[in-house]
Structures are given as C-alpha cells and as structure tokens.
Amino acid sequence: MAERLYIFDTTLRDGEQAPGYSMNLEEKIRIAKQLEALGVDIIEAGFAISSPGDAESVETIARSVNDVTVASLARCVKKDIDAAWNAVKVANRPRIHVFLATSDLHLEYKLRMSREEALERVKENVAYARSFCPDIEFSLEDATRTDHDYMCRVVEAAINAGATTINLPDTVGYASPDDIRNMVDNVINRVPNIDKAIISMHCHDDLGLGVANTLSGVRAGARQVECTLCGIGERAGNAALEEIVMAIKTRPDLYDLEMNIKTEELYRSARLLSSTTGVKIFPSKAIVGDNAFAHESGIHQHGMMANSLTYEIMTPESVGVVKTNYVLGKHSGQHALRRKLEEMGYVLPDEEVANLFSEFKKLCDRKKNITDRDIIALVESTEQPEKKIWSLVSYVVNSGNKMTSTACISLKKGDKVYEGIAAGTGPVYASLRAVEKIIHHPFSLEDYQLSAVTEHRDALGEALVKISDGEHTYRGRGVSTDVIEASILACLSAVNRMLEGEVSSITGGDSAIKMSFDNDMLVGHTDKEAADANDND
C-alpha cells in the first residue's frame, strides 16, 4: 500500500513575504479557501507575532477553513508561541510551527548562543508549545549547513519534548540533491525516536534546485513537503507546489505515494494567485504557464497529432487547463452560461451568475467568439465584488503622437453623475487624472499592467493597477475589449476599495515605482524593510 505524503503550503506565510505578493485579509481568505479546495493538508497562514494584522489574518483563516490544518509560525520564544496559539486555536486542526537556527554560522552571528544553549531553548519551548497543542512542528533553520551530529541531538530532543513533525529546511537554497539525501538518511538512521515524527522538507530555490532537493528528500523518507503556489517566496522563492505534485503523479515508478491533492485545481489555483497579486505567471512556467502545453514546432505538432504522449507527459486537463472552444455567444442564455461554468469547475451562487451573465452579454456585443479564457477572465474580475461607490458611465479620450492626451470621464455615485476632464502624457494617464479630479481623493499609481487575455484583434484586455493614498495600497482589476476602459475599470475597482476603507498589507511589502498625478516625473520609491521578526525558514 502506498504511503501518504502531506502537502504543507506556505504561500500565505513564506510566499507572501516576497516583494509584490503581499495580500490583504480578503485576498488571503480567498487563497486559503482555494488551497483547501486544492486539497493541501496544512496551510501555514502566517507569522502571528509579526504584527496585529498578521495575527488577525491567521485567526480569520483558521475560522474560514474546515478540512485543513492551519499553522502559525513562531520563534523559539514563549511570546511567539502564545501569539501563534491564540491565532490558530479556533481552527478545527491547529498546529504551532516553532523554529530555531541550528547551524554554527547562525548560532554565532545571529543568535549569539552556544549549541548547548540552543538545545535547551528547543527543549523548553517545544514542550511549552506542546502544552497548548498536540500538533507541533519544529524546524531546524539552516539545517543543510548544520553539523550532522548536532542535528541528530536537536531532532531527538525536539521529539522528546513533543514535536510531531521535524522540518529540515534548506533555508538559503545551498544544498544539492545528494546533500539532502545524506542529511535525511543521517536523521533516519541515527535518531532513535524518529519513528515518532514525520520528516518534512522546506527547500528554497536560490540555485534552482528547490523542487529537485525536495523530491530527493521525499525519496530518502521525508513524508511532508513545504511549498508554495508557483514557487513564490523570499529571494528566488520556494519549491513550487504544482511541480512537486505533478512530478510525483507523473512518475509513480519513482514515488509510490498517495496525496490528497486534486490536480485539476492546480491551474485555477495559480491563476487565482496571479489575479490576486497582479504578478503574471511566466509563460514557460512548468505545469501552469501559458506555454506549458503549447507546441509550435512542426515536428512536435506532427507527433502530437499522432499521439499526444510523444510530447506531453501529462494532459492539460489533468492540471485543470481548459481547452478553448467557441460554444457560447450572444444568443446563449444564462442556463447555458451556468452549465459552461460548471463544466469549467466554477460553482457560483445565483446572484453571482446573474451579475456575470450581464457582463458576459456586454462582452458578446463586442466579440464574435467567446473563449473559455474570456470566461475565466470575467469570473476572476467579478470574484472580488467591492462596494461600488463609484461606477463608470462613459468616457471620451483624445490622443495622438502630436497632441496632449485628454480624457472626459463620467462617473456615477448614488443617483448622481459627475464629470471630470484632464490632460496627460498618454490616454491612460489622462483618464486616471480625470478620475482623481472627480472623486476629490488624491492617489498615486504604484503599478500598472496591461495584457491580452486571448489572441486576435478582438482580444479581451486585462488591466491590473495598484494605487496608494499615501498610507495604504489598493489593487484593482478590469477587463474589456477596450484597453482604456479596462484601465479605468481597474482604477475604479482600486478606488472603491480605497474609499471603502479596506486596508491592504502591501505597504511595506514591496518596492514599487510610484507615479504622481501632480507631475509627469517617475520617482523611485522603496518601502520600509521587513521587520527582524520575519527572519525565518
């Protein structure tokens, strides 16, 4: 019988620490629920002691999911453990994840303590955590640069103190697959009580070996893997969840293991992360990139037509990639749209389907053929319905290479329509300045992205913006066949969140280029550095 492999997802903790990936509470809950639908076993929801906002998000996530373990990270300090427990204790399956660096390098220069002092710290604090919760994970930070004899002593002591999972992280992405195998073999063969705990791998990708090292650990006997969607994380990131999962699924001859993951949810999970954070998935990204199942070479295409196994080791459907077809159009009804949504895996409430159908009909008036990717874009653009304080009525934009762009925008608030006119160095710039004039609330544009959802001349355009009111940052998203309209809709989505008072945790999380509407200068701006409390696996 195949052994069980547990998937520990740290997208909302280690992944969210990466520049550009910070999320507000609503966004974290959406990601957490999708991770639960994907079938991960453990969600590391955050680092509760790092801020009141992080503690709140961990607790809210713990209340929002049902069939998954929720963990909070904690240093080997009682106040950290208290904060972690207070945040996760409402979960159906709580876990406290305690860590301490064990390499001589970290002990001497970061912690300034001896090996024996660190060992006593582990014993005391793991036991303290176990007094609250039966599910305790202990991580030996910088394990791959830790002396093996000392590592075995620490692991044995942690298990004796109550740890049920032992994590051996490659914190700085230094190791090779051979190093990982030797380390895990050493722990399995030399720690007498290792049978009372599960060994976990947490590998960073600084040398591009995160997934390879994780899989090497699995082959050596690790039965938990720590990973993130699309491999996001600090520096070069973490091992990518989708790559680990599909490597194990595709090669049962090497990995005779069972997982709870629903692989058909992988693509949607990656898309949700991208649409939530505004960070695009690299086209050649394994498993979930746009080119992962694309074949342009004539030789490859011929082989695919003969037998798809010639150049595809997995099917697009197995990871949830939908094949484009042209079934729906302007004559399709709401029932047909609902059926198509269900075929694509979207089960939405009646009210959301009705709202989506309204937007679908508007799109049908502009596009002859509606693709599955168009529908995905519409769903994603309506999945975060902010309170519509301001809505777009109309816009007229004049632009050219020998004139200053001008925009006349009409917005509706309540029953009243307001109009604003502004000029700028480009049509989008002018439009957003007009919006700013109407709402009487200054903001700066931190980031702006525009891309085509599909191909051909009538492609649906997707705009992603980040705006700041000087204190907090807000994201917005808009889709339309007109890129100017998509840009205005994205701006309004962010503006409505700003005016609604929804606080984003992005500020302090990434370095961005901010554009002031008061002049045409681009000013580089780097937000504050992460707090020392975020120094972890």
Image (cartoon, rainbow, N blue to C red):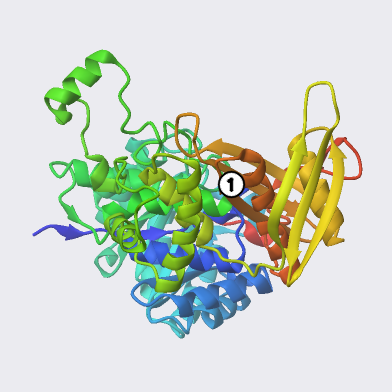
Q: Is residue 118 above or below residue 508?
A: below
Can the viewer see residue 326 in this picture?
Answer: yes
Can the viewer see residue 238 in this picture?
Answer: no
Q: Residue at x 36, y 46 (%)?
A: 372
Q: Quadrant of the N terminus?
A: bottom left
- Compare residues 261 and 269 and report the one nearer the observer: 269
Q: Position of residue 503 (x, y in %)?
A: 70, 67
Q: Is residue 60 above or below residue 73?
A: below
As drawn, the residue found furthest toward the front would be 331
Q: Residues within 10 Å of mark 1 (few under 14, many from 20)?
A: some
Q: Position of residue 72 (x, y in %)?
A: 51, 70
Q: Is residue 344 above or below residue 93?
A: above
Residue type highlighted by circle 1: Leu
Q: Position of residue 201 (x, y in %)?
A: 37, 52
The image quarter in which residue 505 lies: bottom right
Q: Residue at x 30, y 58 (%)?
A: 336
Mark 1 secondary-structure assignment: helix
What residue sits right under mark 1 in the picture?
105
Instruction: Please indicate whether residue 58 sits to the left or right of residue 152 in the image.
Output: right
The image quarter in which residue 526 lies: top right
